[in-house]
Image (tube, grey):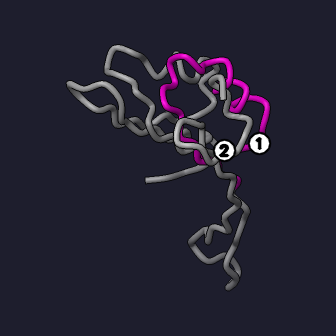
Amino acid sequence: MNGSFDSVAQGENDVLSRRQTFIVDDSPIVNNTNCQFLLNCLMINARSLKNKLPDLHNLLYSYDYECIFVTETWLYHGFTSALLDPLSRYNVIRLDRPNSTGGGVCVFIAKSISYE
């Protein structure tokens, strides 16, 4: 796939992505009705983010995703989150795999979304 996130692929070595829209119940109850909103999310298996930063930045800044979930980031503690989101539009939550190559997960949550 030449390091691109743009395609949905099924091969073992291809980048996998899935776009999903969620309805989220926003509590507390306002005027006795539940407030609901749509949450646009994307999940990708990156097989390394380090060599796909332009594609990642395109996803972050050219589309309207509130959450982006990334598996197989292959990042390490010395690779800062500021390199992933240089415009600082997302909260970046990472769990890098220590002492090993491969693995790791990352979530980008738009700063307009509250979470715990």
Point out the tag, 1 or 2, that comes first from the N-terminus.
Answer: 2
- Above/below status of 72 relative to 43: above
Residue at 40 percent of width and 16 percent of height: 79
- The disc placed on residue 46 is none
Per the image, the residue denoted by label 2 is: 9
Q: Say left or right for 41 vs 45.
A: right
Type of residue at label 2? Ala
> Which quadrant would residue 69 be assigned to in this image?
top right
Seen at 55% across and 16% down, the residue is: 51
Query: In the rendered image, which quarter is residue 24 located in?
Result: bottom right
**Residue 72 x/y as whole percent:** 44, 36
User: Up-down: is 45 above or below 102?
Assistant: below
Q: Which mark is residue 64?
A: 1
Residue that extends furthest to the front in the rendered view of this protein: 11
Q: What's the amino acid at mark 1?
A: Asp
Q: Do tag 1 and tag 2 residues touch (Cβ < 8 Å)? A: no
112 left or right of 76? right
Residue 80 vertical position relative to residue 95 in the rendered view, above or below: above
Is 1 a magenta residue? no
Residue 105 location (% of width, % of height): 41, 39
